[in-house]
Image (spheres, rainbow, N blue to C red):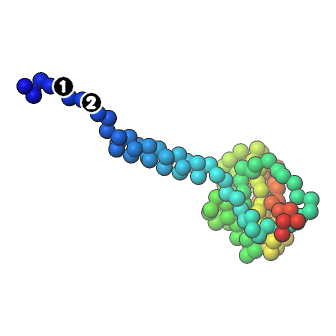
Amino acid sequence: MRYFETRKARIEVVPMIDIMFFLLVFFIMAALKMIPASGLPGKLPGSSTAQSLPHPKVVVTLYKDGSIETQHQKLTLDAFTAQLRKNDPANTVVTIASEKDANVQQLTSLMDACRKAGVGQIGIAARDAGQQ
């Protein structure tokens, strides 16, 4: 009788592959969110005395037209100051990645906005003058 014969167990592989692809995509997306914004590495001004700083908490990009951007979001100076005040400004490190054609007054205004928020550590991103 065929009715009482034992069937051989088999493992379905297709659902396991689907789950593995889902986990792979999940971890890739999570890893991409952990990579900080890097500013404008191609248009940074050069400096012969540039030195490495600790990893910043906030990277701000200053464009030559005076607009600023942080975390892929354009902001005004007042909105940026308010955003810095929400976090712990005393322990926040701000790095300004300015285009080399940006005005010194615009850079000073951005630094003043950081100071008004209570940020004590401000750095200016530059690349080594020999790499230009």
Q: Is residue 102 above or below residue 52?
A: below
Q: Residues within 10 Å of mark 2 (few under 14, many from 20)?
A: few
Assign the C terminus to one quadrant of the image.
Answer: bottom right
Residue 7 lies left or right of residue 40; in this view the side is left
Q: Quadrant of the N terminus?
A: top left
Q: Residue visible at 15% across and 25% down?
A: 5
Instruction: Check the image and name the residue furthest to the front.
Output: 1
Q: Circle 1 — which element?
A: loop
Q: Quadrant of residue 66?
A: bottom right
Q: CA distance from mark 2 to mark 1?
A: 9 Å
Q: Residue at x 12, y 23 (%)?
A: 4
- In percent of the image, x 83 and y 62: which residue is there? 126
Question: Horizontally, is 127 left or right of 84 in the view?
Answer: right
The amino acid pointed to by label 2 is: Ala
Mark 1: amino acid: Thr
Q: To which residue does mark 1 refer? A: 6
Report helix, strand or loop for mark 2: loop
Task: Give the label on residue 17, or none.
Answer: none
Label 1 CA crowd tier, 10 Å (few <14, some 14–19, many 20+): few
> Foreground: 129 or 115?
129
Picture disc at residue 9: 2
Residue 78 is at least partly visible in this image: no
Q: Nearer the viewer, residue 2 or 94?
A: 2
Residue lying furthest left in this view?
A: 1
What is the quadrant of residue 78 in the picture? bottom right
Give the quarter of the image for residue 71: bottom right
- Asked if marks 2 and 1 touch (Cβ < 8 Å), the reply is no
The residue located at (71%, 45%) in the rendering is: 88
